[in-house]
Image: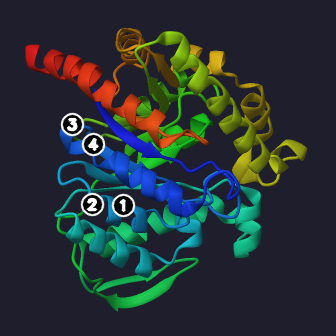
Amino acid sequence: MEFGMSFFPDVKPAEKSARQYFDESLRLADWCDVYGYSHVRVVEHYFHPWGGYSPNPIIFLTAASQHTKRARLVTGAVLPAFNHPLKLAGELAMLDAISDGRLDIGFARAFLPYEFRHFGVSMDESVARFEEGIEQVRALLEGEHVSSNGQFHQYENVTSLPRPTQRPRPPFYIAAVGTPASFARAGRLGYNLMAIPGVGPSPTELLQAYREAWRSAGHPGQETIMLAVFMYCHVDREEAIRIAKPRIERHFQSVADAASEHAERQLSADYKNYDKMVEKVRAETFESQLQHYAAFVGTPADIIEQLHEFDRVMGGVDHASMQVNFNDMSYADAEQSVRLFGEKVIPHFAAERIAR
């Protein structure tokens, strides 16, 4: 298991300006190469404090690429529903070039009703736009003189520039949230998986659906799993809980508010059971996140023990993508946690890999 930094802005302008948030996040990324954090990851969302500071993950990751020369840069994730594939393919390849071939591309389906409404996109087209968009970006990155007569975007004889630095293209991840169908789709398509263990039904069952779909489709090689979690490390366990607990719980209050329209009724056949997912999100607490292996909080020894159990229960995790400055956490608190985790926890798991 490797460990990366995930940045998911979840603050209002009155709490922390975008200027302050991104300055602090990039300063945290400076520690990646010092301690061996394996990636930097950021979301794409719009119009709400839950994620809305990051409407374009490519911009932040381009900046982050100049703060770390070894960590991978991960879109977590871009939304094909709201992006033209010709523009997206070119911008992703540009980031791949600027970062010297360190880009991993995560795609997500989008699920927040107001994003669809403001962009004038039907939620009933969600799955179709998602699958078409991924296939069009893949073809544009892998090939030249590409034509497509898609349902939503059509073009003829296009060679996207720049060409990707990684060949035939950067690795693809599919983001899945809380339904077995989403996990099975990722496995069926043969792409790596990024998911959140603290949302939806049993995470072990969801991961099993992904692994079974991967094997049934006959894909070569080994699947890769990245799970998004919270992390706060402190020399004092009670102080770690005092700092992390209210901020994790406010994060879930924010996502419940952002997704609240799903609780009123089923908005689309593409979003079955999202009302139940919102109910679950509303019920999440700090303690339930610990129980679901979605938050790792405490001393270095505590977190090492928690992560071993996490890896065992999930049947093996390749990447823990850790939120390190969630909600309105101060830079000082986030930095000391990042440094302590880097000094005590990362070397422990690195030594275990060498021993194997």
Instruction: Provide the residue designation for mark 4.
Output: 31
Quick check: marks 3 and 2 in contact, CB under 8 Å? no
Residue at image location 88% in from the left, 46% down from the top:
265
| Mark 2: few/some/many CA within 10 Å (<14, 14-19, 20+) | many
Quick check: marks 1 and 2 in contact, CB under 8 Å? yes
Among the two numbered marks 4 and 1 on one chain, the one whose residue lies closer to the N terminus? 4
The residues tagged by marks 4 and 3 sit, at their Cα atoms, a distance apart of 8 Å
For the image shown, how many numbered marks are present on the structure? 4
Q: Viewer-nearest of labels 4 and 3?
A: 4
The residue most toward the front is 332
Q: What number is the disc on residue 36?
A: 3
Quick check: marks 1 and 3 in contact, CB under 8 Å? no
Where does the image place residue 339, in percent across and percent down from the top left?
Answer: 31, 31
Q: What number is the disc on residue 61?
A: 1
The residues tagged by marks 4 and 1 sit, at their Cα atoms, a distance apart of 15 Å
The residues tagged by marks 1 and 3 sit, at their Cα atoms, a distance apart of 17 Å
- 302, 274: nearer the viewer: 302
Amino acid type, callout 1: Leu
Instruction: Provide the residue designation for mark 2.
Output: 65
For residue 320, say whether it is visible: no
- 27, 80: nearer the viewer: 27
Amino acid type, callout 2: Ser
